[in-house]
Image: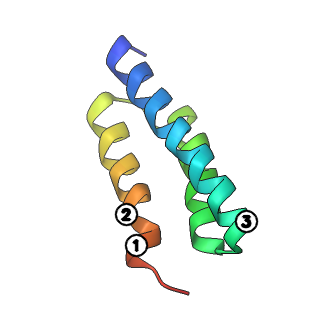
Amino acid sequence: MNEQTLLWSLLFGSIGIGYLIYGRRQRRMVAWLAGLCLIGFPYIVEGTWTTVMVGVALLAAPALIKL
């Protein structure tokens, strides 16, 4: 893990905490799950570009998926 990946993981994890809190308070399951995934995915994914691509996809998920 290099510095760039660590910084991206910190950014996505911080946004994930916000999604998690928002999803719980508004009872929006997609936002809650996206927040949970944003917090946990950097432990599974390797590489800076892969981290950014997965993170951006998870950030866009609540806007694209309406339940």
Q: How far apart are marks 2 and 3 (CA)?
A: 19 Å
Query: With respect to residue 60, does 11 lie above or below?
Result: above
Quadrant in the picture for residue 1: top left
Which residue lies under the disc numbered 1?
A: 63
- Left or right of residue 50, residue 33 in this image: right
> Which kind of residue does numbered mark 2 sit on?
Ala
Mark 3: which secondary structure?
helix
Quadrant in the picture for residue 19: bottom right
Q: Where is residue 57 in the image (x, y as percent from the top left)?
A: 36, 58
Which residue lies under the disc numbered 3?
A: 25
Mark 2: which secondary structure?
helix
Which residue lies under the disc numbered 2?
A: 60
Please report the residue visible at 64 percent of the width from the left and 52 percent of the height from the top.
Answer: 36
Mark 1: which secondary structure?
helix
Camera-nearest residue between 17 and 52: 17
Q: Which of marks 2 and 3 is nearer the N terminus?
A: 3
Q: How far apart are marks 3 and 1 (CA)?
A: 17 Å
Q: Where is residue 65 in the image (x, y as percent from the top left)?
A: 45, 79
Q: How far apart are marks 1 and 2 (CA)?
A: 5 Å
> Which kind of residue does numbered mark 1 sit on?
Ala
> Which kind of residue does numbered mark 3 sit on?
Arg
Please report the residue visible at 40 percent of the width from the left and 22 percent of the height from the top.
Answer: 7
Quadrant in the picture for residue 24: bottom right
- Dot 1 and dot 2 residues touching (CB under 8 Å): yes
Q: Position of residue 44 (x, y in %)?
A: 54, 38
Query: With respect to residue 9, does 1 lie above or below?
Result: above
Between circles 2 and 3, the one closer to the viewer is 3
**How many labels, in total?**
3
- Dot 3 and dot 1 residues touching (CB under 8 Å): no
